[in-house]
Image: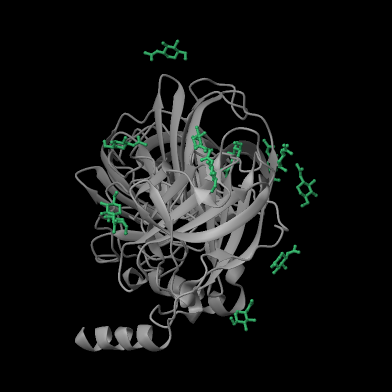
Amino acid sequence: MKTRLIVVAAFICTVCHFTEAQLLPVKPLNTTITNTTCGTTKLCVSSVPNCDPAGNSSCFFTSAQFNNGTLTIEMSGTTSGYVALGLTPTASPLTQIGNVVFVCGNNKSNAFFETVSQNGSTLTPAAVPAIISPNVLGSTNNQTLTQCAISVNISAIPFIPANVPLLFNLTILNGTTNGTDLGPAATVFNSSGTLDLANPMSNIPQNTLNITRNGCGSTKLCVSSESGCNLTGNSSCFFSSIQVKNQTFSIELSGTTTGYVALGLAKQNTTFVFICGNNNNSFFFQTATQNNTNLTTANVTTVYNSQGVVAQNQTLIQCIFNTSTSFNISTKADDTMYNVTIMNGTTNGTDLGPAATVFNSSGTLDLANPMSNVPQNTVLLNITRNGCGSTKLCVSNESSCNLTGNSSCFFSSFQVKNQTFSIELSGTTTGYVALGLTKQNTTFVFICGNNSNSFFFQTATQNNTNLTTANVTTVYNSQGVVAQNQTLIQCIFNTSTSFNISTKADDTMYNVTIMNGTTNGTQLGPLSVRFNSGKEVDLSVTSTPSSNSSNAITNLCTNVLAVLLSALILYL
Ligand SMILES: *[C@@H]1O[C@H](CO)[C@@H](O)[C@H](O)[C@H]1NC(C)=O
Ligand SMILES: *[C@@H]1O[C@H](CO)[C@@H](O)[C@H](O)[C@H]1NC(C)=O
Ligand SMILES: *[C@@H]1O[C@H](CO)[C@@H](O)[C@H](O)[C@H]1NC(C)=O
Ligand SMILES: *[C@@H]1O[C@H](CO)[C@@H](O)[C@H](O)[C@H]1NC(C)=O
Ligand SMILES: *[C@@H]1O[C@H](CO)[C@@H](O)[C@H](O)[C@H]1NC(C)=O
Ligand SMILES: *[C@@H]1O[C@H](CO)[C@@H](O)[C@H](O)[C@H]1NC(C)=O
Ligand SMILES: *[C@@H]1O[C@H](CO)[C@@H](O)[C@H](O)[C@H]1NC(C)=O
Ligand SMILES: *[C@@H]1O[C@H](CO)[C@@H](O)[C@H](O)[C@H]1NC(C)=O
Ligand SMILES: *[C@@H]1O[C@H](CO)[C@@H](O)[C@H](O)[C@H]1NC(C)=O
Ligand SMILES: *[C@@H]1O[C@H](CO)[C@@H](O)[C@H](O)[C@H]1NC(C)=O
Ligand SMILES: *[C@@H]1O[C@H](CO)[C@@H](O)[C@H](O)[C@H]1NC(C)=O
Ligand SMILES: *[C@@H]1O[C@H](CO)[C@@H](O)[C@H](O)[C@H]1NC(C)=O
């Protein structure tokens, strides 16, 4: 500290001599002072918020722009007197400069510029250290408008390191002139706090909307690019929440982007997109249709109450809006099933750049169900190959495929005790996995399905690839899970051996198929066969004499004709 003070004192003695005259030479102003880049390239303050320095109504305005070590200041006042800018440094090392007041005035229709000191409303001509003495770029007045532009070479001030925030309290003063004499100063603007002259946004409130994760999974459905990401933090986070009430979607959308964040709701090949964007630091809302990465403006008349902000120095966009549930895609007022995406992209004004997808539900979500994307019962049922061939009969599409893994695996096991089938069924599918038991041209099907991440069990009859719901009264104790991010369905259930096809209580001979297909809610799409025993199998026999030969055939066929595998019985 001591060392620094000595250095500064030495500097002032050797480098800083004070300017002799306070009036600085002027030349005509060769630019128009405008407010168009306020908040983007320059910091602006004014007597009336957002007033136009080139306009007709009373406006006392100054701007500051810091670029490559040079601070450029514009001053403008609708006056035949003077407009002055008071700068009070509020932090070290700038405080070494002391208070500075720049005056831009009208001397009988000649513009003048000078530096002064302020004591209350009295302004007295005073020199500033030469090192901060401004270069007057130009000035003008015509009795109704007085303007000056100056620059200060901050990089030449030795005690101010590069990239130090230029923290000052600002005032704008005005008053009359008589020649170059200055009448009493009136304060027409006070920053009431410190501003950074190097930061164009430093006086723009960075309010965000109150979008939080509170209520996610309970009162609202939430989706985001990164699970749990901080909505207002520094790292990338795209988030949306949806609440359905009274046939209205209430939607929150937030994204760390300088361009736009968009929510896509898709159904039957049509995606409607709700866009919250940044048009040069102003918020805009728009709706569009999507074709790949192209967003094309399209009206959604049912949207109301949209509001939003561009915040955090144009790195965060947040908005909330409502739309009736019957908007352009669906005409059904109570339709809440959609595939959901979050996208982002650049903006040029309100033009939208190509959309990049940062979240995709990859399946239908029920927007009315806050839990519809929250994994339910992700604890898997304990379905394993333990006991295959000894305590239970097992069949699967691949003889040793991983029941909990990522690659295709369809598996079922049977145990027969006390004239009851205990059945395990597992399939890597997002829709349904089904077990078909066939006898005398009739197939009864036991279905374990995914209804928007919720498990359901159903029985049906089969006609080619169609499944038709049919009750099997002898089924009991069915339970199941939709797991692994909706890519795996597992279930266990019991049925008495005398169910709808066979009336004989001890009949255990059936042709066995494992099938899968898509679901839409609990509706079942056409089935695909994943395993077919090809003949009737005795489900009560866990290990049959033919198992070895079957395995031998399996091994042969693996190498020769893999295609036939699906038709083989795997007695394990
Ligand atoms: C510029 O001035 C006009 C007129 O007062 C105003 O509508 C506009 O918001 C101002 N722009 C900025 C960036 O302050
Ligand atoms: C930045 O300033 C330095 C010296 O003040 C000058 O040499 C250089 O050309 C300037 N760069 C730009 C991009 O204006
Ligand atoms: C205006 O004048 C300044 C200094 O007098 C000069 O640096 C600048 O290039 C001029 N601008 C135009 C547009 O003539
Ligand atoms: C003074 O200049 C401003 C801006 O150019 C203009 O709008 C205004 O009409 C001028 N006033 C007179 C009296 O010439
Ligand atoms: C100073 O600004 C105030 C508020 O805009 C205005 O009413 C007054 O006329 C101005 N004074 C002079 C001398 O221009
Ligand atoms: C303006 O200044 C002159 C001389 O400096 C003085 O005689 C005159 O009274 C002043 N006018 C006003 C209105 O103060
Ligand atoms: C800057 O302004 C704030 C708020 O008006 C005030 O509390 C503070 O004392 C000022 N700082 C200086 C150095 O004048
Ligand atoms: C956010 O919540 C706080 C505290 O509840 C409240 O003061 C503020 O006005 C809210 N902001 C908005 C934009 O709703
Ligand atoms: C998110 O980040 C902001 C800014 O870094 C921090 O103030 C806030 O506490 C964070 N919120 C949570 C929930 O972590
Ligand atoms: C439901 O919405 C309709 C139409 O917007 C409105 O008239 C009605 O008052 C709302 N009912 C409730 C309970 O909010
Ligand atoms: C959706 O697209 C698929 C593939 O392009 C097409 O087969 C199907 O008919 C389309 N459905 C609707 C409802 O347009
Ligand atoms: C989608 O865009 C492709 C080219 O990118 C175009 O061929 C196709 O016609 C567009 N589809 C619609 C429905 O506009």
Depth order, front residue of 474/542:
474
On screen, residue 558 versus residue 541, left or right, reads right
Above or below, 541 relative to 376: below
Image quadrant holding the C terminus, namely bottom left
Picture coordinates of residue 211, whole percent (x, y): 36, 42
Residue 155 location, x and y as percent?
Answer: 49, 78
Name the residue located 30 percent from the left edge and 61 percent from the top edge: 542
Q: Residue placed at 47% from the left, 73% from the top?
A: 132
* Closer to us: 237 or 57: 57
Q: Say which residue appears at 54% left-offset and 68% top-offset.
A: 134
Task: Give residue 7's quadrant in the image.
Answer: bottom left
Tally of numbered discs: 0
Could one spot residue 153 in this view of the protein? yes
223 lies above or below 386? above
Q: Residue 68: which quarter of the image?
A: bottom right
Q: Is residue 210 above or below residue 25?
A: above
- Displayed quadrant of residue 1: bottom left
Q: How is the image coloured?
A: one colour
Q: Is residue 448 above or below residue 235?
A: above
